[in-house]
Image (cartoon, grey):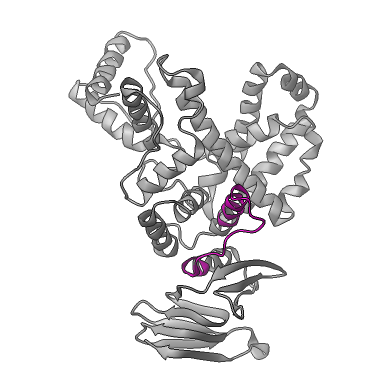
Amino acid sequence: MTQTSFEDFWTDVVDVSKGRTFPTVVFGRVGIVDEAWLILASLGVVAPIFDIDFFSQDQAERFIMATLDRFAESKPDFGEMLKRHRRVYQQHAVGFEKWLREAAASEGERFSGYAPVLEAVAAVLSNEKNPSVFDTKGFSGGSNRQVDILLNLTSRILQRESAKLQEGLQDIFPEALKQTLYLPGEQLELLAARLLKLPAKRPAHKLDTPQSEAYNRAVDNFLPQHPFLDGTSARAAGAVFAASVMVHGLFANSVPMRDEAARHAGSGPDTPNPFLIDFYIQLSRELAIAQGLTEPQPYPPEHVVFLYESLKARATAGTVVQLSIEGKEDSEDADVEILFGDSRINFEMSQIGKVQFDRQVANVHIDAPILDVGIGMGQAVELVAPVTINAARLFIHANEFFVSARGGEKADPTVVLEASSLE
């Protein structure tokens, strides 16, 4: 839609609204609402603007059930199941909504009360032939279950956006061609470019000139309204969506995008991001499978700290999070282990590069003789014992150190920094 056609649309809305008994109500996101209001004002209409907040817990549960009722109208088999087991679905809607609040507690209602997320929840419930499989206790159980659900919800939202755009394309697009457009990977690529303020490089679809022009217009209209973006279309709608988009950027083919995503993941908005490590590990595994590998490629050392910080961001009081990096003999790789309470995450990383700690080094053990380690960004740095670092080169850019040990009398007060050279 061009700017002229957009303004013509609002002129038509004003014309058809004249003489109506009931008011005309139009829904839209923040950015588009502001522009629409200005156009209406130029047409002599002063329209009130009402903010629609995120759903409360009770509203969210009712929204899920209302969405299930809507799904039932087009899916007779599910409609019969919902009719026979409505109370069961209501219980699961309550349990699911409660779990979302707990899993994304740092988001408040930005995630658990966000309509696209709740619609994806309803889609998960409606596609399950046996509703009893959703044991409410399972939602607060193992972290793997929680991760699977978050990944499932974000995937469903991306698929829904694909379907919406494809359905709106003109008849000049054959059906088989439509199914190749605006897929989740393309959406994430465009979203990453937008959030990182980089030029958007669109996939080379096999489109003729009219198709290309029509498709580009559709994407230009759809992308700013994407559910992963907030009302301004300039930031992610929350940490969960930010994690999904940033991880795509971290594994992008474009070197500038990978570099900017790494910088953003370490110091941008929504950092440290408690969901980043989940999306990162999942995508690294998917890429390994696509490449015919049994294990992911060694992670870049520049990514390790923000993955560690991701886990620290979700730690509750008393939960100990530790990072250990052990260089392998006769190898450029290293073994990484992150302890998180009673659980642990293991992966491999390359020693070619630098592990950078900006503001704090806490509970860290590094023994990697060909790895570079950086500490500080020109300001004060806190060292929380125990810290032992043995590296090739140590880059220290801090005007002062604060050394502390936590854990009372049993705390290990050791802080040792060793390197072949100091920069």
The image shows residue 406 at horizontal and vertical percentages of 59, 84
Above-or-below relation of 260 to 188: below
Q: Magenta: predominant secondary structure element?
A: helix
Quadrant location of the C terminus? bottom left
Q: In which quarter of the image is residue 331?
A: bottom right
Please report the bounds of the magenta region as a residue range.
280-305
Query: For the point 76% across and 21% down, which residue is it?
Result: 83
Residue 90 appears anywhere in the view: yes
Residue most toward the front? Answer: 330
Between 360 and 118, the one lying in front of the other is 360
66 shown above or below 108: above
Q: Which residue is drawn at 61% across and 27% down?
A: 67
Residue 28: percent from left, percent from top: 39, 30
Residue extending farthest to the top is 19
Residue 161 lies in the magenta-colored region: no
Work out whether 356 lies above or below 171.
below
Task: Between residue 90 and residue 49, name the one nearer to us.
Answer: 90
